[in-house]
Amino acid sequence: MANSNLPRRIIKETQRLLSEPAPGISASPSEENMRYFNVMVLGPSQSPYEGGVFKLELFLPEEYPMAPPKLGRICLDILKDKWSPALQIRTVLLSIQALLSAPNPDDPLSENVAKHWKSNEVEAVETAKEWTRLYATGA
Amino acid sequence: MDSDEEIHDVYDGDSAEDYYYSGGDSNMDGGDSIGGGEDEDDDAGYGYGYASDEGSEKTYTVLREDDIRQRQEESISHVSAVLSISRVAASILLCHYKWNVSQLHDQWFADEDRIRKSVGLLTKPVAMFSNANEMNCGICFDSYPRDQIQSAVCGHPYCITCWKGYITTSINDGPGCLLLRCPAPGCGAAVGHDMIHKLASDEDREKYSRYFVRSYIVDKKKTKWCPAPDCENAVEFELGSNVYDVKCLCSHAFCWNCTEEAHRPVDCSTVAKWILKNSAESENMNWILANSKPCPKCKRPIEKNQGCMHMSCTPPCKFEFCWLCLGAWSDHGERTGGFYACNRYEAAKQEGLYDESEKRREMAKNSLERYTHYYERWASNQTLEKLSDKLKEPESQLKFIIEAWQQIIECRRVLKWTYAYGYYLPEHETAKRQLFEYSQGEAEAALERLHQCAEKELLVFLGNDDGEVETQPDFETFRPKLAGLTRVTRSYFENLVRALENGLSEVDSQAASSTSVSSKNAGAKGKGGKAKSSSSRSSRTGTRNIDDVNHWNCERCTYANPESSTLCQMCRNPR
Ligand SMILES: [Zn+2]
Ligand SMILES: [Zn+2]
Ligand SMILES: [Zn+2]
Ligand SMILES: [Zn+2]
Ligand SMILES: [Zn+2]
Ligand SMILES: [Zn+2]
Ligand SMILES: [Zn+2]
């Protein structure tokens, strides 16, 4: 089935994700389909997301790594036109975590976010907290 | 519904107009301006002068693919010689500089290092080559003997299979492949076009070379692609002319200024308003989701894909904007810290407002297709061949049929735009409205007669199964009739176009006896109040059956005159 002819690259990436997980991030493949991962990213402390656990579903399409992993509704440049097959699942998850941390307005990773943050930090932080409360706790 | 409101807001606002209208000003500022155009003012988009002697002086040139390729070759040779770099490097640079040779020269000689860095033309490898016999591919993670590993100048090692996958993915992603870079994060070394040609499949190589040709005209100030689907020609425009209607060799007629289909007699801003109005009127998300839109910055059509409203135009433009409001993405409230859930889209989806791909196909029809249909059906050489066969007439003797159909197509287009004109004609300008409706009605009636003759009556000669074979009419009677109708219809529409482009100014000076046909007609029978002027629909069906009522048809021009008149109102031929 899908798991039997898994490319070596995916197997290697999975092994490394399990054996050396990045702090605050867990990614475990589903048993039925090794291309499907359940991901949890902790809201970084000192960030508006603190205390939240972001649950994400990550899927590696057939074309992976030529095509980026699919990650629900998340909009991240490296999941789109900035994707390179030399990037990995780990890189993607670290980027998400980085965005969740107190955004650094000069961080090119989140240029658009940064603009908003620069211009209206209070409102942005409030919105983020609200979203954390609504979507990322409890559920 | 929330999203509806937003859409209306957008379409009502001035911003929408600006966006269609600015004619690419936005990408003309800054250092990226493309030369060649000699910065003539770009705002000439308003006034259309009426080209009184049409066709006598073309204000544009159609460039075919071969013409473009030849120009590219010349530029590459030139840059390669002047900069003392390889042809491969020269063509990478030219792609980055949108084929603006002089700008490339200036910047290169001002700061070669900076240019090399920004386009990824390294002079030496940055990655350390180990001396091992086996190397690890950075994509599939497998190890390979040295000869199976390839790199760009930077030296980052990937196996041939992975390179091939990388290249084919990039080519299939669009013209961005022309600026392909090494996959290593942060590397940026340019991948040479020679390497791509070597590793790409035949099919991909073909695509790549198409993109290469097309890159020549992106963002060029005085040259634009013909917007007809599948047409590979470009049109080079004589800046300074203010008649924007151009006709490509493929027969597609479009406005060079806004690239909508040709839209005389209305101006570009009215067209933009009209299009937006109609789209806003389709009320739900369907229309918006179904269509591609021009990039707000470079005007290239961007097709929406998948759920996200965050659009990025294809390289080299890369403008990021919101699909819903066409505003810059950077102005949008991505306030969730990088997660943008595209709420409006999700909401619409949940409410079942669209069923993605299905409706998309259905909706993504544009008026172009209609004209193409006419053209293929009637105005094509095939029709001519078939007729020539049946009638044993040389094709050269049948040109009048093609001319009739070209006239019909052109008039249909003009007619369509007159509705936009009428919509924006102020209600209180009663006299103008009347003149407008009258002239429009007359022109439309003439067109209907021509259309009827060119279609129904022609069918008989074509021997179509559904054309009832009554008494076989005489082709020699048909010929002058159709030619006459073509001429008459052309003159009606020329008058209509001229009148509308003059802002219906005849109304202001109606007392003075005018020489223009349309005002004469208006004076003669405008008040007679033919009921048809009020509704175009009824006028359309009305003329179809015009023979049934009390009319007489002019011998000379076939115009249907009211019983009461003794002279033909069209050509003044006595009854
Ligand atoms: Zn490989
Ligand atoms: Zn590299
Ligand atoms: Zn064309
Ligand atoms: Zn226009
Ligand atoms: Zn663009
Ligand atoms: Zn998005
Ligand atoms: Zn007549």
Image: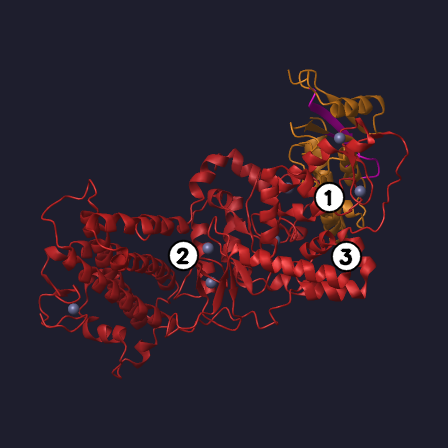
User: Which residue position is annotated with label 1?
Assistant: A126
Ligand 3 is within 8 Å of the C-beta of the residue at disc 2: yes
Query: Which residue is labeled 3 in the image?
Result: B85
Identify the image quadrant of residue B451: bottom left
Outermost residue on the right side: it is B131
Asked whether the beta carbons under mark 2 and mark 1 sit within 8 Å of each other, the answer is no
Give the residue displayed 56% in from the left and 56% down from the top: B299
The answer to whether dots 2 and 3 both sit on one chain is: yes
Kind of residue at badge 2: Ser
User: In the rendering, at what x and y percent does residue B441 appear?
Assistant: 25, 63
Viewed as shown, does residue B570 lie left or right of B506?
Answer: left
The reply to whether the magenta stretch includes residue A53 is yes
Q: Secondary structure at mark 3?
A: loop
Chain A, hue in figure: orange
Q: Which mark is residue B507?
A: none
Q: Are marks 3 and 1 on the same chain?
A: no
Residue visible at 79% across and 50% down in the picture: A105
Q: Which residues are magenta?
A: A34-54
Q: Chain under label 3?
A: B
Residue B431, image x, y percentages: 29, 72
Q: Can residue B166 be seen in the rendering of this structure?
A: yes
The label number, if any, that marks residue B251 in the structure image: 2
Task: State yes or no: discs 3 and 1 in contact (Cβ < 8 Å).
Answer: no
Q: Which SS class for mark 1?
A: helix
Does residue B86 lie above or below A125 as drawn?
below
Tell me the distance, in whole angstroms, between the alpha carbons under discs 3 and 1.
55 Å
